[in-house]
Image (tube, grey):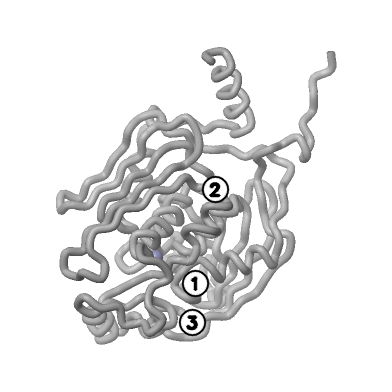
Amino acid sequence: MIAEIKTLTDYKNCEKTLQNAIPCVGVGLHSGVKVRMVLRPAPIGHGIVFKRTDVSDKDNMIPVSENTVVDTRMCTCVGNKDGVTVGTIEHLMAALSGFGITNILIEVDNFEVPVMDGSASDFVTLIECAGVVKQDAPLKAIRILKEVSFDDGKGASVCLYPAEKDLSIDFMIDFKQSKAIGRQEYSIILSERSFKDAIAYARTFGFAQEVEMLRSMGLAKGGSLDNAVVVEGDKVLNKEGLRSENEFVVHKTLDAVGDLYQLGMPIIGHFSGVKSGHMHTNMLLKALMSDKSNYEIVNLDDYEEAALKSFRVSA
Ligand SMILES: [Zn+2]
């Protein structure tokens, strides 16, 4: 018998890119200036790469990985060996994760991705307008084999656990200083559908006094009630209110989805975040990748087929 050669249509899970390039313009959260961004298709094996089109005297290409993250204080920021950086990538990264896009070139003419409305909704629209195409290469996934965790010793922690399939996430926040937020919990099994329907809409948030402080430091210049939920004491200042009762914890989940995608491939496992932020998730990924016995890279089609067979045998 001749061995079967898999073709594009045989892959259930394959690498993906955009069908067409798509431009957009928005404001940088910290710079407050207009940023032009173009999302461009990229070939198999390319990965997620940013290009700073305003930089010509240095290396302006910045591939995304857990090791190219250079700052996690206000946002997730990636950089290259020449010190060229791009920040506020996390909501766009979440949208790329939601659609399973593995290969893309993202051109920006400033040091941050436009903040849009503070959620991933506009990035979802952009990607849908550009179209998503399958590429003729099987999709690889990273399967968690051992529990890996990171605890900052100050009450925030993150953990990845083994699971049979999918990436499931649970998140807990507890803001005792504001009744508007309080304690919230959220769980989701990540898929394109659940990403678009359940979490893409959730906006970033901050406290009014923090916004003042950031402004005095020359940061958050582009931040406004148009691109963030702003909380003062026990009140939400945005006239339109919240998009959902639990928008805060859903946004934290969105951030986690974006940050976990620094690996550039789907995760088979369970993620749990407790009061955590960008730094914690990045430290967790570095801990995960530092020991090869923590994970295995699988061809997702083969893995799902084998899992299905073992289920049939055991049932
Ligand atoms: Zn965020």
SS at badge 3: strand
User: Residue 278 at x, y = what percent?
Assistant: 34, 58
Relative to 161, does residue 172 appear above or below in the rendering? Answer: below
Locate residue 79: give its quadrant: bottom left
- Front-most of residues 315 and 130: 315
User: Residue 63 at x, y = what percent?
Assistant: 52, 56
The 10 Å Cα crowd at callout 3, few under 14, some 14 to 19, many 20 or more, is: many
Q: Residue furthest front?
A: 245
Relative to 255, does residue 237 appear above or below in the rendering? Answer: below
The 10 Å Cα crowd at callout 2, few under 14, some 14 to 19, many 20 or more, is: some
Locate residue 122: give its quadrant: bottom right
SS at badge 1: loop
Q: Which mark is residue 57?
A: none
Q: Quadrant of the N terminus?
A: top right
Locate residue 54: give its quadrant: bottom right
Q: Amino acid at mark 2?
A: Ser
Check disc 2 and report the residue beneath it.
191
Viewer can see residue 268:
yes
- Mark earlier in primary sequence (3, 2): 3
Mark 3 vs mark 2: in front: 2
- Front-most of residues 315 and 125: 315
Q: Amino acid at mark 3?
A: Val
Check disc 1 and report the residue beneath it.
113
Q: Amino acid at mark 1?
A: Val
User: Residue 87 at x, y = what percent?
Assistant: 43, 68
- Mark earlier in primary sequence (2, 1): 1
State the separation of the CA atoms marked 2 and 1: 24 Å
